Amino acid sequence: MSLHVFLYGARVSSTLDSPPVPALDASARTAPRRRTRVLALPEARWALLATAAFLLALPLHFADAPGWTYGALYAIAYLAGGWEPLLEGLRALRGKTLDVDLLMIVAALGAAAIGQVLDGALLIVIFATSGALEALATARTADSVRGLLDLAPATATRVTADGEESVPVSRLSVGDELLIRPGERIGADGRVLDGTSEADQATITGEPLPVLKTPGDEVFAGTLNGTGALRVRVERDPADSVIARIVTLVEEASRTKAPTQLFIEKIEQRYAVGVVAATLAVFAVPLAFGADLTGALLRAMTFMIVASPCAVVLATMPPLLSAIATAGRHGVLVKSALAMERLGEIDTAALDKTGTLTEGAPEVTAVRPVTGSGLDEDALLALAAAAEHPSEHPLARAIVAAARTRDLRLTPARDFAAKPGHGVTATVDGRVVTVGRPDSGLDPDTDTDTDTDTDTDVEGGTVVRVERDGAPVGTLVLADRPRADAAGTAAGLTALTGTSPVLLTGDNPRAAAQVATATGITDVRACLLPEDKVTAVRELQRAGRKVLFVGDGVNDAPALATAHAGVAMGRAGSDLALETADAVVVRDELAAIPAVVRLSRAARRLVVQNLLVAGAFITVLVLWDLLGHLPLPLGVAGHEGSTVLVGLNGLRLLRESAWRPPESAGHRPDGGRPRAL
């Protein structure tokens, strides 16, 4: 066989022995990626047209060009960005509701009616861009869920009394018997009846290495079979598989954010109704007492301008967008202003293990030659790497990589064979070399675990035994090491939240405990399926915590969606995790996570400052217009002045100093709190 698997402690049934299979390429290991392009969305195209027209009009306007030149461009901006919210607003009116979108369209038209075309165009562009971002987020979420469903194969081989038949997965039912050939994806959740193989189930449990599957073991739909053949009895309807449940959990978690959105809509409704009613009153009351029509209309339109929420909108967006830009420069992509705001609200962190706190791939951590074998560490590693070189198993790749790191020369191997249940055998320099599971005691001087019932030593790593001509010559220990910045990140998050992070992993308790010890985490929960991680996050939320979840795999997506804020590791992260998370750490630097949380908190402080400033300006200008006589130019100047002021205040987060150095996380006397900006 061309693929090498370590199928420890079992033998393949002779009825299921398989011919050689080709190596699996990357396309076979991941689901196809379907990603909606930005300009495929009509909302994005209209927003782009409105923004382009507005930007072209600005220099002509300030250069005192003929009015028809920039007037036509402003008209395009109004039409491109305003027709859809106007239509939606009219539909809302038909349903006896009034939203802020319609109010802003009316305010923009009102501004244009009294000659303030620039103000109205700016409002239109802001709301058109916001609508496009919302549509893009919705489309990308749908893309990621569809991509997850592509993990499961379309057909499966069902074993019948007459032989075998290929059937659509949707036609499978509980009790059906399936034949899973080497390299195939498993078509349904079930239990192994016969055969031995390994399954790459990182998409479900996050485990970094393929897992041994023997009769009686559970397998999951969408996971990748190794080089052995399996007979599997279906135990769940395809609609109830773990993959299907992950999709459902993501959708349910997304819907749990709706109450917050409903609350915001209620506030918008009340504000919009109040401003419209007040504008009508400002126009009608003076007119009823004998004021002239032009004066009453001018006062009402001035009120509409100064009471419009443009300053409030800009009070919130520049700090958050500036924080997003600064985070992006440092390798953290935060997907929206709402996501940036949520990151600063968290008070508890929950972390995945494999690929998040750890590198996500095994590496050689110890080389232990047997006393009297005549081999030193380099010679033992070179011997094992030579035998493993033809293999494509993750452990084999790690052994070969370790040998290359030491610049060791590898002798070409002959007669290579991978034997399920034992390991690999090859002839190196005329001697038969076997690399596989330790199944008998070794010389005490090797200082290895000789327990035949385990494949891990006290370090929590995988022990690989090396034999030459049937005699043991040493062992190698391989482990998935914690990232270099894992401990510092855990300490930084503890300082920010006041609570030690929680480790949530699908890996075994021993491996989880090893990583927890290395990173200083005390709350460890292992052997978790995706729904178990969701349950753990929800338990924390029911206790009143706002949870930040950090993960990288498909199995982490439900928890990422359920948590108050989710961060995905970008380098090896699955499509679904990247799409579901609120932020993505592109450079895989864990220390960037506490840094972006601190940045978010700084942005939220600036938002509060800006809202106070904007609210004060609106209050003063509105009272001036109502109780006195506010000249229209002064009203516009005050309104625009407040807008510029809060905008510039928000842009302060674009400074390089706004990003707190990751290495300082958790080590400053102030406990990691950011300095006031």
Image (cartoon, rainbow, N blue to C red):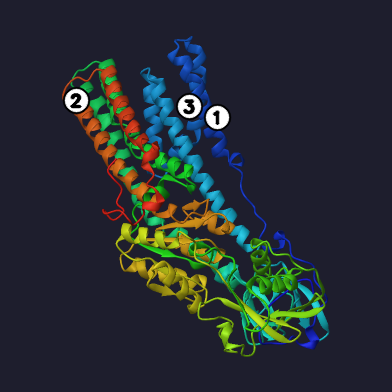
Do the numbered discs 2 and 1 sit on residues whose CB atoms are within 8 Å?
no
Q: Residues within 10 Å of mark 3 (few under 14, many from 20)?
A: many
Q: Position of residue 11 (x, y in %)?
A: 72, 87
The residue at which mark 1 appears reads as: 49
**Nearer the observer, disc 3 or disc 1?**
1
- How far apart marks 3 and 1 lie (CA) works out to 10 Å
Q: Which badge, 2 or 3, comes first in the chain's sequence?
A: 3
- How far apart marks 2 and 3 lie (CA) works out to 30 Å
The residue at which mark 2 appears reads as: 624
**Above or below for 257 versus 640:** below
Q: Residues within 10 Å of mark 2 (few under 14, many from 20)?
A: some
Q: Position of residue 260 (x, y in %)?
A: 36, 54
Residue drawn at 76 percent across, 73 percent down? 167
Closest to the observer: 594 or 367? 367
Task: Indicate left or right for 637 with 243 as reference.
Answer: left
Q: Position of residue 537 (x, y in %)?
A: 41, 67
**Nearer the observer, disc 2 or disc 1?**
1
Q: Secondary structure at mark 2?
A: helix
Q: Secondary structure at mark 3?
A: helix
Q: Which badge, 3 or 1, comes first in the chain's sequence?
A: 1
The residue at which mark 3 appears reads as: 78
Closest to the observer: 319 or 591? 591
Q: Amino acid at mark 3?
A: Tyr
Q: Secondary structure at mark 1?
A: helix
Where residue 563 sits, quadrant-wise, is: bottom left
Quarter holding the N terminus is bottom right
